[in-house]
Image (cartoon, grey):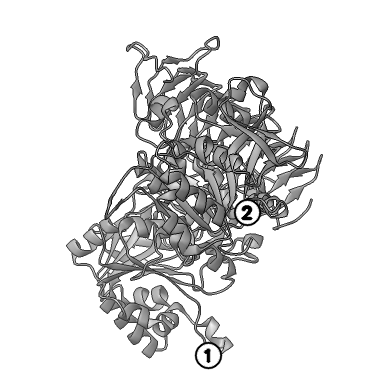
Amino acid sequence: MKLPMMGVINLIHEADEMESLTANRCLATVPFGGRYRLIDFVLSSMVNSGIPKVAVFAHTKFRSLMDHLGSGSNWDLHRKQSGLFVLPPSMEDQTDFGKGDLYHFYRNRDYFYRSPLEYVVISRSHMVCNVDFAKVLDQHRETGADITVVCKTSAEGVPGLARKVKVNAAGRIIEMQDHFGRLDSDVVSMEMYVLSKDLLLDLVETSLAQGSDHFVRHSILSRLNQLKVLSYMHEGVLGVVNNIAAYYRHSMELLQPEVWKELFFKPGSIYTKVKDEPPTHYRNSADVSHSLIANGCDIEGTVNNSILFRGVKVGKGAVVNNSIVMQNGVIGENGSLENCILDKEVQIRAQQQLRGSVEMPFIALKRKVI
Amino acid sequence: MRKNECVAMLLAGGEGRRLGVLTKDLAKPAVHFGGKYRIIDFTLSNCVHSGIETVGVLTQYQPLELTQHLGIGTPWGLDRREGGMHVLPPYVRQKGGSWYKGTANAIYQNLGFIERYDPEYVLIISGDHIYKMNYDLLLDAHKKNRADATLAVISVPWAETNRFGILSVDEDDRVVEFAEKPKKANSNLASMGVYMFSWSVLKEALIRDEAERHSSNDFGKDIIPTLLKDGARLFSYRFNDYWKDVGTIDSLWEANMDLLEDRPSLQLNDRSWRIFSASPNQPAQYIAQTAKVQGSLINEGCFVEGRVNRSVLFHGARVGEGSVVEDSILMPGAIIGKDARIIRAIVGEGAVVGDGCLLGSVDSEDIAVVGSGETIRPEAELKEVEPV
């Protein structure tokens, strides 16, 4: 079913403390879960929910983003009508880079105008979840809300940087803070905002006219009294992945079978850019347990409690423990890893041993030879 | 290879009767192979890697799943504005139409397709063999010999010569004798069913063959022997790599097992010669704490809690806790419950083997087969599915 709603994936000024993992790529394209990029989760959720038109507002370091998204065909968004729009920052001079998302929405207002779709959902790229936006829109229409914010209750708190919100008994958001705020609440915002297109364009223009240019900080926070801002509670898995601790913890959570079964399949499948990797070859000497292994791997050694991305080679006698090895990593013979995150194409020489701790995993830069 | 210098015609209508329940609703070229692929992916990928960008795929038997897999050729990069892949089913003309009577007749009925591209050469291949071959080298040999037709050949065991078209060649590799499935062979060079023709020669031969009332309209039985009799320049091209006709349950099983050796003779993980296929886009495979996987090929979307030994698991296959899968093939979405034993078996697409079931045995000569979508329960007597 086609939803009367267009999607916006907003990469402008995303909170990012991913250290070297985002040295040369934006947060949206940080590899996650063996074969995905962070943006795949929200993008697939949108497509599975029936959203026919999605814009990605790119900002910085978006080479990998363009490469990953391509024509959008892997998400069935290569359409004659609607489909995928990647909107790079349109600037007149360098200072425009510092301007907020409202400025960029305004510069690209044709994206919103050129379609009869009545609603918009604005989201970020770093929420690892599988959401049915059709349900969010249903609630939004039933309750007559001005803005519906997708939220998650989490008693133990989330390890990533997230905006805390306070919700009253009626589900109305009465307080909302930036991620560094000290608000005492166990509800966090998933940074997904459903509102009508008309209201959005109105907020864009009035806020900019007042000299403010940040959608959440300026358009919403200051209007919690005037606008009916309601929460929609997400029941499923959520990972707020924008710092290393959260990245490592949520990656490891995928090794719980319930999380694997839910996040990747319910309510829809998560799609990503397809690579033509063969099935993974487990040699006779392989010993693998409690791990997530992508295609194209060649395993002769031991892998335990770890995530291997596509095309990883684990040599004879090598041991990979509690680690994440991204695409095309090579662990030489008798090498060993413990609590490590290896970026793409890292090579670990034979006999080499690397150790990090659970709190501070060792991170190896892309293409490094150790 | 220049564009349209060579057009490939891929015969993909095979019924695959000897594959029994595995081809009940499926043409042989669409049978799953190697954990991720379908048989036809190998020849299509060969075409692309050899620089052939115009491919006619001739379909006939049970084409639904095959054509769905092929789509518009996107997985192989054959969705082109010029050339690309075209599915060619039999069709009706003003003077009536007919099914493809034989391999030669199938090409004859599509002369119009080839004429649109007016190539110098036409490559005839079939979609039911597993091999990686650079057709460009075959074309080079064809040109060098100023041949009318060049047949790719492979040495087969003498005992199996009666299954193939057998060639005798002179010291220049020119074909001097051709015998289709001979009882007593003079050579062990078998035709691989890969033919490079000069287009003008092929066209004339096909038109002549069609006019011949008693012809069975087959390349091996009619076209090649006739050309040979007429003194055409027929040459052989030796192929020394892995090649397998996977037409029977046993050979299909064997070819899958061949991939599991520590140094397989058919290398799937070769970046210079990727086998392309439609991707199911499923998550990375999950290997549980209780699992043990050795000497196996496992594809994305699998969920393994039991033991898997020397087996091939296609996407979305599941193996429950306490189960053992050995020397077996689990087709896409096959589900094995808990504490089951699967040995020397092929479990069809989407089939379910219930908790505690036993399937196949170490001593059995035959490979046990569960058809697509079937369900096996422990209380029910095991259905013995014999290869037809």
Q: Specify whether B238 is left or right of B83.
A: right
Q: Is residue B72 above or below residue B102?
A: below
Q: Is residue B14 above or below residue B148?
A: above
> How crowded is the residue under tag 1: few (<14 C-alpha within 10 Å), some, or many (20+)?
few
Q: Position of residue A8 (x, y in %)?
A: 39, 69
Q: Is residue B384 visible?
A: yes
Quadrant that contains the N terminus of chain B:
bottom right
Amino acid, disc 2: Ser
Q: Return the residue at label 2.
A: B50
Q: Position of residue A74 (x, y in %)?
A: 45, 57
Quadrant that contains the C terminus of chain B:
top left
Instruction: Identify which residue, B264 or B3, lies in the foreground.
Output: B3
Q: Residue at x 51, y 12 (%)?
A: B361
Q: Position of residue B36 (x, y in %)?
A: 51, 40
Amino acid, disc 1: Glu
> How crowded is the residue under tag 2: few (<14 C-alpha within 10 Å), some, or many (20+)?
some
Q: Residue at x 30, y 72 (%)?
A: A224
Q: Specify whether A366 is left or right of A103.
A: right
Residue at mark 2: chain: B
Q: Return the residue at label 1.
A: A92
